[in-house]
Amino acid sequence: MTFSRSLITAVLFVSLIGPVTAQDAGPVIVIAAAAKAMGADTLNSISYYGSAANFNFGQSNHPSGPWPRTNLDDYRRAIDFRQPASRATAVTFASPVQGGPAVQGAFQQNITAQTAGAQQLEIWITPWGFLKGAAANSATVRTQGAGPARQHVVTWIAPIKSPGGQPYRLVGYINAATNLVDRVETWVEHPIFGDLQVEVTYSSWRDNNGLKFPSVIVQRRGGWPTFEAQILHATANPANIQELLTPPPPAAGRAGGPGGGGPGGAAGFAPAGPTTTSEKLAEGVYRITGGYVALAVEFKDHIFIFEGGPQNEARALTILATAKSLMPNKPVKYAAISHHHADHTSGIGALVAEGTTIVMHESNKPYFDRALGAPRTLAPDAMAKSGKKPIIETVGDKRVFQDGTHTVELHHIKGLPHADSMLIAYLPKERIIAYADMFNMPAPNAPPPTEANIAHVVMVDNLERLKLDYDTVVSVHAPTPDRPIRKADIYATIPGRVAK
């Protein structure tokens, strides 16, 4: 994307007439005035640094709470708008869920002209990138508000297509008094939230030899921050831009995600396994493997699945198909989700398309009502194509499903740091429990643990509180190597704990 000749002419015109007025607020004039005010009219590339934070999108402890924060030190980003390309690096400090000191790590985010469409938007939602994209893509403008709140709202369509073949739309809000970009928003595809709004605000502007840059950047997705930065300095057209954009060998870091340089948003897209298999645990009770594990139970006239929509649509469809092949001529009437985290619910649209009633903890319902109620035009999934609406039923502390043949109890696990809306499934006749994420079984040859994992202890405390009589344990995350898990195995991993 490059500035057009008309924009260059408009910059000269704006330099003669001064601030943009409501009467002359055409798109070329508005964009040119903002570019001149921000020092972007001669900007081809930029680098900036400061401190920042990424937030793990879709992984909050409570469904109505903020995404978990990971602090970023020595945050640095370089962008070349001509290629287009961007690279961001930082040192991460994340606190583990089970407690203890923050763990230091490193990451890098690299975006090139060949990078997938939604990632490229990270370049064009920057204030300078937004103006350049608007200049090159037939932007429109309208003016709203009055006095200090008056804004020029600039909209343009990016020549970048979503998986559904739709172009991405960007909307920027330019302060009419200062000609600085206050906010940019766009929409990207997401398996749970559909057409997900991405909103970035820019404030506390500073100046470096005519280049205006915001010292505070906040990006939000799903209503909560996914990236924050406090920018200390920015440089226009750095002479070493190509060096700044060139990543080290892959081993030096790991790929990032949204927010201009972090992992937030990656959750929910975990690949499913290459094959799907099943294991009969009892009459009419099956463990479905090959990715995140599901538990399928046969009732007289329908099927019940625990963890029916994990990972992605492909995995959820496979679980549904496998369950129906094991128990033919019966619909999947109910599918319970263990908790709201994106890697456990990114296939939830397949359940809606199936007409399955989705069962979840009551605190999750507002979250999924909002998410599943959004349009899904950028990447139409099975839900969008079916035209069906979600059917959601909830659980408080306990709910029982039974028909005289089988009984499935759903219980709420309380006090869990990982997710406070966690449900487990319990089959009293078969003495089976199924759970997700509270702990993973160590390898058979692992040394005995010297201290207990907090989440693990919370799980066992809850099972004892509920007085559940179980022997077989089904984990949504299969152990490595995959093998049966028994109650004794659970207690053996907690030092000093004896089964009751």
Image (tube, rainbow, N blue to C red):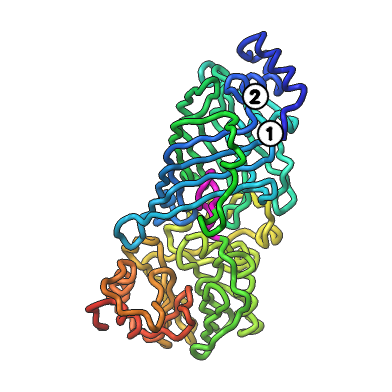
Residue behind mark 2: 42
Q: How far apart are marks 1 and 2 (CA)?
A: 14 Å
Residue 428 seen anywhere in this rendered image of the structure = no
Q: In the image, what residue occupies the spot 45% across and 53% down?
A: 106
Element class at badge 1: helix
Q: In which quarter of the image is residue 187?
A: top right
Residue type (three-letter) at the residue carrying disc 1: Gly
Q: Which residue lies furthest to the left in this view?
A: 496
Instruction: State whether the magenta stretch is mostly helix, strand or loop.
Output: loop
Residue 40, image x, y percentages:
61, 25
The disc, 1 or 2, on the residue closer to the chain's N-terminal end is 2
Residue 410's quadrant in the figure? Answer: bottom left
- 48 is higher (above) or lower (below) than 359: above
Q: Where is residue 193 in the image (x, y as percent from the top left)?
A: 57, 52
Quarter that holds the N terminus: top right
Along the line of sight, which residue is nearer the eye, 145 or 302?
A: 145
Q: Which residues lie in the magenta part? A: 256-268
Q: What residue type is labelled 2?
A: Thr
Q: Which of marks 1 and 2 is in front?
A: 2
Q: Position of residue 154 (x, y in %)?
A: 65, 29
Q: Does residue 80 show up? A: yes
- Position of residue 167 in the picture relative to residue 149 (left or right): right
SS class of the residue under badge 2?
A: loop
Q: Mark 1 points at which residue?
A: 133
Q: Is residue 401 above or below residue 376?
A: below
Pointers 1 and 2 in contact (C-beta within 8 Å)? no
Q: Let me know if residue 452 is in the magenta part.
A: no
Point out which mark residue 462 bears. none
Dot 2: within a 10 Å radius of its alpha carbon, few (fewer than 14), some, or many (20 or more) residues? some
Q: In which quarter of the image is the C terminus?
A: bottom left
Q: Which residue is drawn at 46% across and 85% down?
A: 483
